[in-house]
């Protein structure tokens, strides 16, 4: 429930953290530890993440937020003359206020379908780049950026990820996955892509905490640490090094204890499925159905005001003169009561 | 007490947060609010800070950490051809991994005394700059950066701050104060510089949370908001915008309720005074005495190992062949028992 | 004639400079002058350009090349959080190796027709930007970049330029025109846009020298110098300040003596018209016809090798399986003999 | 002689170019060639430079000016988290308007003697850096920048350069020499450092053209091209790629034909020696004597105005209340008549 008294479905970063995290925070509060991630909680969390990803030698670093993580990782991998290939709808392409360009790198945008890039489109683009006799006057594609789930709540398959890997190998590009909402992918019955798969195919990916049950925090996993020789300093330079790194460590330690992270998204998925089913039953149109925690409803404009009285939702886009697309997001803390109240309100 | 079982005096960001903050965090955890600082806690905290600073029209924004805050504020004020004047020992000059240069700005370093710049030195430097017929080939000084307390725990007086203001006005420079440890200045009996003074003389300053009782967070105060037209976007571009901005808001709301911030540093100051008195009594030399929460002891090298068995301290610098300067930092949570145990160990 | 013995039509920067420029260079060679543009030739050239543009108070600065000029002027106008709106085919969007992003600014690309943006498309884009409730998380459009002639050799009309001015005024954006090939626009019988028009409607534009009869050099005109308070230092910081600025000054002094610049493109236009007429007569297809010095021919792939024996041309793009688009560029020095030989070869 | 009618001794970039260069420019003017350095003159010049440097596999690229060259080469070698070590008086430290910082790199300044760094000072600095337990929070020294001759006209010996090489090898730093005035070093009887030595010890250096008889241009030599995989694109991104690269190629082709570059500085050295001898004879004090083309005279303030009537000189610095240090620079084109007239005037 929102502080406004309405049903809170506008996004998935509206509440605090999973109760287990809060409990741990309270317990450890007055213990002094080393700073900047040199503490036992961080070390334990890193070990658990390495294990969950099946890569015992991985470099794992905790950063605070998503834009910061994207800007830092992308800058860490790219040389000054390289850019990053992304969907035109990618978070880095649109909603990061130019953070990638601020560290000097062009975002090379390609068309997408429901938020997804295709490996074939990337291949065509990069082949055309190298075939262009002027390509030394152009920005070299040095990385492919995917989000999983995408900004539209859609998912990549293992085969698709493997195909991106092949393209990246062929053209010496890094493959990076933004997992801001990764828990909702892992909890989706349609997902076949595991943490181990991400570690196998990616040069780097991040396991989202902020939108997935933590107060804040994203865990960057770099399976081959030799790829990023000065990552700690790069993080510091980007203003992304938390003094009390323990706060990040303890949150991810909790999230990776007893497999919490892999099940924390389930309430969100179940709620989303119920809401989708109810919309279908009521004959309420959706822009498309997603396998994760975001629902894109097409609503008559004259119903919006009444809906807004009871429900916090996100404006997505204009559909036509008489209709608007709104986005409803469930999260790890969405309750059955909230879901039912929402269904009634829709 | 540290997680290692030793006495924790290595810095002032080793523990969690003031219990009142933790209490508030627990209470509000499952309430949904707006993101990115658009929440009631943040709004309340901003109002309290404006009131404490005596500037009802100020822009107040909450960022996560110190390096991030410095890089963001300095980049926000400077134009691309300008640099920032700072002490050679300033945090931005040495320990921010080139974050200021990463956004394109030179740090123009001047000599210091116990961490302090003098307004006269700044004036001489800037006068010489404009007198140099080649100054259009050089980096224009666009801002003066001070830390208060300084990295050496020393304090500026109101008169000194006013003198910097005059130099800045004369040469069209912004004046910015890094208050990472501001609570320890405010709690020092030697301090005469209030929050209202900072608001009167500075173009921007930040009220440190991370080292002063918060889990994390720094509150930037810009008395004249017209000076920074797109500050929110700049914060976002620097990866410094916390999705759950409420976490920052509620911490500063607690810190600025009933004047907590102005007294939260007292235990640290009292402990530091006791330790200093004990060192003097025992005839243990110090590099110099400071009015705040840092103590710089000169220790015989052959005593360091034994001390390190019981106490976590910070290495500061080599003193001579047989001696080392170590830094002890007290904090808002330092207890009488810890202080007495430390005195015994020294 | 090219050093390879072929007909040189691959671009318009293949030869040295107009003979009058070379003559002046020889005459002045051993005279010592002030550096960095503080010389009599530069001063004289600036005065002539101000007069030709009808803006006696303009700031005029000479830079060396086009990419450098674009990067410097765009960085000078934009604040760190702003980007520049450009056609997807704009030189800054594709062929400057990320120079704009290297100084931290996003190029916001819009669709084009034959290389031209439309003021209406810009208006729609910017309106949608400000209507988006998340626009503070996005890159603010701070400038519109046009090239005249465009990369496709097309021209804007006075009415079109005025329409861009209105959009820019409405949304507080600067209007900048890249005139790398401006002489070929001014010499085109279809052009109605004068230097005075450019000065009236633009915040900045540059008068191309490199492709228009100079050895090198571009003259930036900023009608209202107050818009760029530290332009000299910005030029220096971009590595764009020529020590022997006199070389730029004397070239533009020659180009703006007796109206040379406004007629220097005529041989190129006349040659292009003859070639176009001949192609039409022979029934050779073109991608489209342009009013300036670039000709885009559709050639059967099996004729390319033979053509390449006699003519240097530019590859433009694949047309279909059996055809290729090639670009032929005439220039200020193209002779009647060369034109006739080319027509024979086509 | 200056265009003002005075004797021109204010710097060494006041005249045009060596007559052989002008001759070549005139001869080749109407020949069309490839752009961006893809021309026969550039190729010939590169071969001659490789031969003169004794490194047949070197990458040689021509840029336009010194600040541009420094910014481009330093950015090409450094990773985003690295800085460049330089004398506090180095050109990059003071007179490049923050160009190094604008591409994100800190200039790490060390004390100098008459403009020279010492390898021992660099070693101490870098050792202390790695010994500091906080060095991951600091800017890593990734390159050493020397100028030869220095800004004070002094020279490094072969042994000194070899010592820098050893420090650089030990700490994985690149060694880069700014040879803006290199011809005056090569022509100095005191110099023992050859082009081959530079190629042996440096990771990169540039052979100055602008101050050494060219109209403009600097030739960057990178003995091991594998060190800079995308140097062409980096040059383009820095706006440092000249469209008519042939102009650079032909100038360096002339300068490296029949050893011209190695003797072009002689008239300057001979003139400087005569002037120095005359000053000594007249009892006119100098700040110190240099082995190259710059003379630093200490002049009574009340003689300056009269001197300024006849001679263009450079202001260097205030010496004491009654005296000023002025700089006189001779160049490749200084005549015996000018030298004698200057001696008379002094």
Image (cartoon, coloured by chain):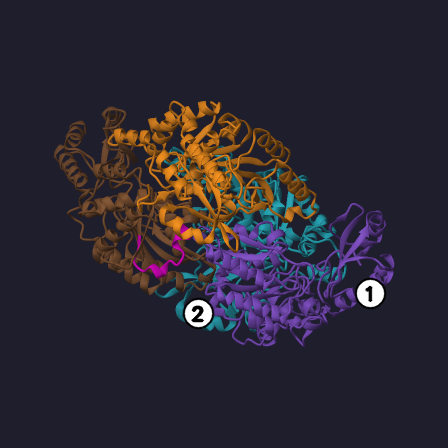
Chain colours: A brown, B orange, C cyan, D purple
Quadrant position of residue D17: bottom right
Residue visible at 43% across and 51% down in the picture:
B303
The residue lying toward the viewer, choosing from A191 and D130, is D130
How busy is the neighbourhood of tag 1: few (under 14 within 10 Å), some, or many (20 plus)? some
Decide if residue A146 is on the left or right side of residue C71: left
Comparing marks 2 and 1, which lies closer to the viewer? 1
Magenta span of residues:
A221-235
The residue lying toward the viewer, choosing from B110 and D103, is B110
The answer to whether residue A185 is seen in the rendering is yes
Place of residue D334 in the rendered image (x, y in percent of width and height, measured from the top left): 78, 64
Residue visible at 66% across and 71% down in the picture:
D254
Secondary structure category for the residue under label 2: helix
Decide if residue C39 is on the left or right side of residue C146: right
The residue lying toward the viewer, choosing from B43 and C311, is B43
- Give the chain letter at badge 1: D
Q: Which residue is mark 2?
A: C304
Q: Residue furthest front?
A: B282
Q: Residue D277 has which mark?
A: 1
Q: Is residue A233 magenta?
A: yes
Q: Is residue C102 magenta?
A: no
Q: Is residue D242 above or below residue A291?
A: below
Q: Is residue C88 above or below residue C278?
A: above
Place of residue B334 in the rendered image (x, y in percent of width and height, measured from the top left): 37, 36
Q: Is residue C7 above or below residue B340?
A: below
**How far is the residue under mark 2 from the one under mark 1?**
68 Å
Secondary structure category for the residue under label 1: helix
């Amino acid at each position: 429930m929102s502080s406004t008294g309405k049903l809170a479905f506008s996004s998935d970063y509206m509440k605090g953290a999973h109760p287990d995290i809060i409990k741990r925070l309270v317990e450890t509060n007055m213990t002094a530890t080393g700073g900047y991630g040199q503490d036992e909680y961080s070390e334990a969390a890193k070990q658990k993440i390495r294990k969950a990803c099946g890569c015992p030698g991985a470099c794992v670093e905790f950063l605070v937020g998503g834009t910061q993580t994207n800007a830092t990782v992308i800058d860490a991998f790219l040389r000054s003359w390289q850019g990053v290939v992304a969907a035109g709808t990618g978070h880095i392409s649109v909603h990061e206020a130019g953070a990638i360009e601020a560290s000097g790198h062009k975002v090379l945008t390609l068309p997408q379908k429901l938020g997804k890039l295709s490996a074939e489109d990337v291949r065509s683009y990069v082949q055309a780049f190298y075939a262009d006799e002027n390509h030394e006057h152009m920005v070299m594609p040095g990385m492919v950026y995917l989000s999983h789930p995408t900004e539209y709540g859609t998912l990549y398959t293992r085969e698709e990820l493997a195909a991106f890997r092949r393209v990246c190998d062929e053209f010496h590009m890094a493959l990076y996955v933004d997992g801001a909402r990764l828990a909702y992918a892992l909890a989706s019955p349609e997902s076949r892509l595991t943490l181990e798969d991400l570690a196998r195919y990616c040069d780097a990916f991040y396991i989202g905490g902020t939108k997935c049950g933590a107060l804040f925090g994203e865990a960057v996993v770099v399976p081959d640490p030799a790829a990023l020789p000065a990552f700690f300093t790069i993080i510091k330079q980007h203003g992304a090094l938390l003094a009390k790194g323990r706060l990040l460590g303890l949150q991810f330690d909790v999230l990776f204890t007893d497999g919490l992270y892999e099940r924390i998204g389930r309430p969100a998925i179940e709620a989303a499925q119920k809401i989708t089913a109810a919309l279908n039953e009521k004959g309420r149109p959706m822009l498309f159905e997603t396998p994760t925690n975001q629902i894109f409803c097409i609503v008559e404009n004259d119903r919006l005001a009444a809906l807004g009285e009871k429900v916090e939702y996100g404006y997505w886009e204009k559909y036509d003169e008489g209709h608007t697309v709104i986005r409803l997001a469930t999260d790890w803390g969405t309750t059955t009561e909230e879901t039912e109240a929402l269904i009634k309100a829709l």
